[in-house]
Amino acid sequence: MLGRLWRNLLAIIRELSDENAYARHLAHHGCSHSAQEYRRFQAEHFGRKYKRARCC
């Protein structure tokens, strides 16, 4: 019970911190982790995120 709770908590933290999104980005592009690839991910991810700005 406690182990499952811990795994779920870690999964939520990974999703909120965009760690899972970065892992999906790497898998989609067939790349391995690097500083350059992380910058590319951030540019794409946050570019899309803030392009859809909401009012109020």
Image (tube, helix red, strand yellow):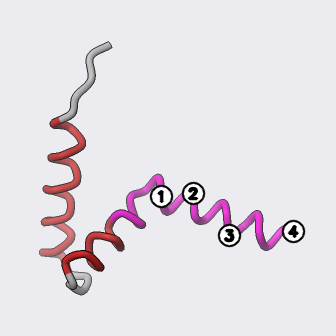
Q: Residue at x 25, y 75 (%)?
A: 28
* Quarter assignment of residue 43: bottom left
**The magenta stretch spans which residues?**
1-21
Mark 1 residue element: helix
Q: What's the distance in space between the residues labelled 1 and 3, CA to CA? A: 12 Å
Judge by depth and name the residue closer to the eye, 51 or 19: 51
Residue 6 magenta-drawn? yes
The earlier-in-sequence mark between 3 and 2 is 3
Instruction: Residue type at mark 2: give it.
Output: Ile
- State the residue position of label 1: 15
Point out residue 24 in the picture as x, y percentages from the top left corner. 34, 71
Q: Is residue 25 above or below residue 31?
A: above
Q: Is residue 36 above or below residue 30?
A: above
The earlier-in-sequence mark between 2 and 4 is 4
Instruction: Residue type at mark 4: give it.
Output: Met
Numbered tag placed on residue 7 in the rendering: 3
Numbered tag placed on residue 12 in the rendering: 2
Is the N terminus in the top left, top right, bottom left or bottom right quadrant?
bottom right
Instruction: Residue type at mark 1: give it.
Output: Glu
- State the residue position of label 4: 1
The earlier-in-sequence mark between 4 and 3 is 4
Q: Residue at x 15, y 56 (%)?
A: 44
Mark 3 residue element: helix
Label 1: how many Cα within 10 Å (few below 14, some 14–19, many 20+): few
